[in-house]
Amino acid sequence: MSNLDQWKNKTVEELINRPKVELSPQEMERRQIYSSLLFAITAYYFNGNKYGDNNNYPLNPKNLKSDSYLGHNIAALAVNKHGEVIDFEFNHNRLFSSSVEHAESRLIRRVFSLTQVHNSWKDDAQDLPKKYGNLLSEVSVYTTLESCTQCTGIMTLGDVKNVIYLQDDAGMYHIGNIVKNLTDGQGFIEAPLPISGIEIEFDLYDELNDAFIQFKTQQRSKEGLPFVVFPNGEEKYTSSITSFLCTKEAYNIFKKGLDKLEGFELNYADFQPNEKAMSNKEVLEECVSFYAYATSMGKRGTPHRM
């Protein structure tokens, strides 16, 4: 019997259900560092004017460096098996007038290009595989929002090891869990293991999810401020998650990532998941350095060093 046979006639609830990923406190600390970095980068490149710059956005943060909307405030980060940060990307739907320029899919295409020319942000990537099919087999992807069908598929084709998502997206129906269940043990192609923020005990995960629920409730009831007011006075209420990700509540939570990164207190500084891997102390130093790079040369994930 193939693995697929066991899923015949299963309910949706059964298809999305997966056992909790058990991680050691040392591993959780390590993943919290990368997650803090990703939130910090998201806050730095935050843009809020979803419907254009000529409207009023009562719920958006004020006095940002730039409000021009290039894409949703959704970012992704790739990390290799040694603990090195490979690169990051953002959603750029608006920039490219496209609905498929998602952070994870852009990141996977970027990382394939970087690994095959032996290039990274530091130009010192280690132990590159010889075949493109397993270039990313030891890569972890961190994403600020649970991945969609497209990005799950691309990460599956890319043989990404696991994906750590830091906010739930009910509109994506836990597709990462479904594809992982269907491909697990097939021996041909296998989806990345989905790991939620709760499984790494990342406190900003709950904070972001709770804030979205409050935003959705307020917008659907139309009590309080609208999301946007157009020049003709028309008010628009919207409960979409991408609109929430333009609000000051979301921005302030993302901004806490930098505070966590800069003030991170290590309990397991010397921990290494394998003998060639960086220690948690070195990972923290790496992430602080990468933040400096990403916010000076990173260009929100568009071509770097320009």
Image: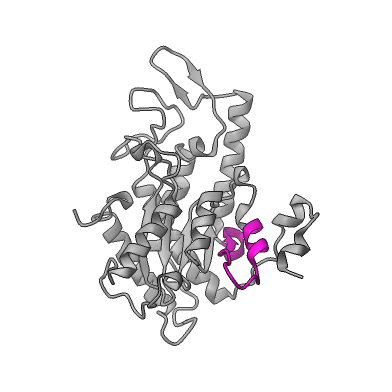
Residue nearest the observer in this picture, 231 or 105: 105
Residue 275 point in image, percent of width and height: 44, 87
50 vs 65, left or right, is right
The residue most toward the front is 1
Residue nearest the observer in this picture, 11 or 169: 11
Q: Is residue 235 above or below residue 101?
A: above
Q: Which stretch did the figure color magenta?
A: 177-201
Residue 288 point in image, percent of width and height: 33, 65
The residue most toward the left is 306
Q: Does the stretch in magenta take in 25?
A: no
Q: Does the stretch in magenta take in 199?
A: yes
20 vs 296, left or right, is right
Question: Looking at the image, which residue is at 78% across and 57% down?
Answer: 8
Which image quarter is the N terminus in? bottom right
Residue nearest the observer in this picture, 115 or 50: 115
Q: Is residue 60 above or below residue 109?
A: above
Colour convention = one colour
Question: Looking at the image, which residue is at 62% across and 52% down?
Answer: 175
Residue 151 makes an appearance in the image:
yes
141 vs 177, left or right, is left
Residue 158 point in image, percent of width and height: 47, 64
Quadrant housing residue 85:
bottom left
Q: Is residue 124 above or below residue 106?
A: below
Residue nearest the observer in this picture, 217 or 261: 217
